[in-house]
Image (spheres, rainbow, N blue to C red):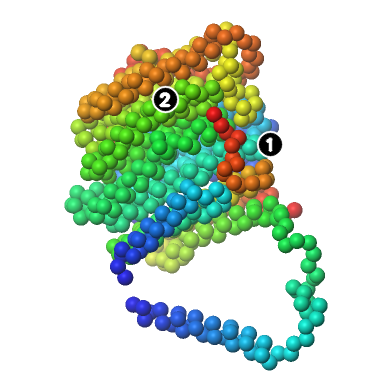
Amino acid sequence: MPLGYFLGLSAIMFTVGVLGVILRRNALVIFMSLELMFNAANLVFVTYASYYQILIGQIFVFFVMAVAAAEVAVGLALMVAIFRTKHSIDIDQMSSLKG
Amino acid sequence: MTRMIDIYSILPVMIVAGWALLLLVVDLWIPRHRKGITALLAAIGLAIALGFVLASSGNTILGFNQMVVLDGFSSFMQVLFLVSGMVAVALAYDYIQRMNINHGEFYVLMMFSIAGMMLMSQAYNLLMVFLALELLSIPLYVLTGFARTRLESEEASLKYFLLGAFASGFVLYGTALIFSATGQLDFVGIAAVVTAGSANSVLFLIGAALLLVGFGFKIAAVPFQMWTPDVYQGAPTPVTAFMSVAVKAAGFAALMRVFLVLFPSLSEHLTPILWVMAALTMIVGNIVALAQNNIKRMLAYSAIAHAGYILMAFVAFGNGEVVGNTVAATLFYLVAYGLTSFGAWALVIVIEREYGKGILLDDLAGIGKHYPWLGVAMLVFMLSFAGVPLTMGFWGKFYLFRTAVQAGYIGLAIIGLLTSVASAYYYLRVVVYMFMKPGEPKLQINPWVSLVIGVAALAVLLLSLIPWTILELASRAVLLLQ
Amino acid sequence: MLMEFLPLLIILLLAVFIGVFVVVLGSTFGPKRPGQRKNSPYESGMVPYGPAKRRISVRYYLIAVLFILFDIEVVFLVPWAVVVRQIGVPGLVFMIIFVLILEVAHLYAWKKGALEWD
């Protein structure tokens, strides 16, 4: 299959992720959109790792997965903490910081 | 295979990271009321690493199959990060006791973040850039939310996390596109492919633009600055001080390393974008700061504006003749800005009494009269921030403007000059409130914080007289170009 | 290239067939004696009480987050295990360092009481 398909799919995934982060208001959904952005990059890495026959593209994906897990842990912990304080994770209601 | 020289090239990073891991375990057995021991141990670890950085400076080594580099630029930056870390520990020690968030993890997280910054200054492979970026960011998300159950801190943390991860997504996708265009991840390989002309130029350009967006978030350049005021206000103040100095410096380290080595060939396309970003950052930062009553938010916008000045010198990144001056002027400015900024934030820490309230201008009333030396120190910092002639901030701006003019961006230099004059208004207003308004402030001043204020004020004064010593050091901190 | 996936397709079809076949077999030939007990959600289990949407203990999230972290790190163990004979002792040393770092995290979580349910 031509590379263009993979690149196109990843570009669509990335755009959907970016739009999700910008347009959605629920922190958890934004979080999932972020993961979509990361995985769009992963798709490019594995595609071109196989195209160029270079292993580091695949290794990069391992690192992205591990880092994304660390980020998920921190993000979920933050969301649990904030939900316990104010019973909502809607980012439109986060207005205690104003100037 | 791993050689000794590889280990040697990143020894300071390994010391900081390893020390932080040990400290995490040791801290478990330190009782709650004696967390000063943890602070002391953290400072010792940073000092040891600083010794190793100084001992290994002056060498140029490519280690671990060109994954990392040790050069003058990285050594200079690492000294900056480590000193920032020690200052932040000194500032935090009293503050986190007072705000009742006295946990040893504070110092451990800070050390991890510093390790990430140090790695960032040494990264010579896009994989390392990404890992260093995450290693420096993730602990900071937690540190921002460290005053847990305080809503301000939690909200700031979530905002910082979402936008920080968003920026990481851009950096990651940009990296992926550069990999797709060149089939390489290390800087040596990418530069070689680009020179040979066999890279896919469209993908390469889009990748570079996405990296610029990602780093733009980290250095808080307009239009990627919207998180800055909220996060700076909501985070514990020592963390804010640390962010405003060290994270900004780390962002610029990444920007300079990546753009100067990889993208000089794209300067034709990227320079106009950078020009607009620099102009907007200077204008928006300074204009919005004029309207701020809250000192924390004012300093946050001022931090944005200062990033704009540095970007101004960076616009000419593709011009090989001025690049040396750009690096030297930027490093000088980061030192000048760092000293001043730490001093100003330390004063905020002294005055701040209740978490999340921030400080309004009215809270400053009378401080100049009752605590004259605090007032004088603030005067020094504000004059230096405003760039009043013969202060350190002035010399920093002078070198940046000179670089911009040298590269032919006179319009940008004029914008910088005008906004800089406008900024004098809100900086001097702080001093006016301190000295001219009557008030009865009651402050409890911790010796460590006053030490930071005193040393920062003295350093700013002293270096205002002999700025060329730092510039000389900065000029010798050569960035290894391929 | 697509022929490589033929076995997968066969397995897929077979799995769907068996699943459908068993269900159809049971519903066609099985005896049907509906009653109140028969229609309860868990026929031989406890009688359910309370609404299905309850707040879950925050401990659950803690364990889940820890699980994500330690689970994903295994991603580095797998490629190492594949080539462990080729890379020999240096590879083993680096993997020991890696696991020790994870062990620090484990020790921290343990001492902080994150692994205890109550």
> CB under 8 Å between callouts 2 and 1?
no
Q: Amino acid at mark 1?
A: Pro
Which residue is at the front of the view, C4 or B186? C4
Q: Quadrant of residue B463?
A: top left
Q: Residue at x 75, y 61 (%)?
A: C51
Q: Is residue B352 above or below residue B281?
A: above
Give the chain of mark 2.
Answer: B
Mark 2: few, some, or many residues within 10 Å (few <14, many ≥20)?
many
Give the chain of mark 1.
Answer: B
Which residue is at the front of the view, B297 or C4? B297
What secondary structure is found at the residue carrying circle 2?
helix
Residue B348, horizontal then vertical, whole percent: 55, 22
Mark 1: few, some, or many residues within 10 Å (few <14, many ≥20)?
few
Q: Is residue B86 visible in this depiction of the protein?
A: no
Whichever of labels 2 and 1 marks the residue nearer the N terminus, that label is 1
Q: Quadrant of residue B221?
A: top left
Residue A45, horizontal then vertical, whole percent: 37, 59
Q: Is residue A79 visible in this depiction of the protein?
A: yes
Residue sitting farthest toward the left? B196
Q: Residue at x 35, y 61 (%)?
A: A8
Q: Residue at x 25, y 33 (%)?
A: B316
The residue indicated by pointer 2 is B286
What secondary structure is found at the residue carrying circle 1?
loop
Q: CA distance from mark 2 to mark 1?
A: 46 Å
Q: Quadrant of the C terminus of chain B?
A: top left
Residue C117, horizontal then vertical, whole percent: 72, 55
Marks 2/1 same chain: yes
Q: Quadrant of the N terminus of chain B?
A: bottom left
Q: Residue at x 78, y 86 (%)?
A: C33
The residue indicated by pointer 1 is B31
Which residue is at the front of the view, C105 or A1? A1
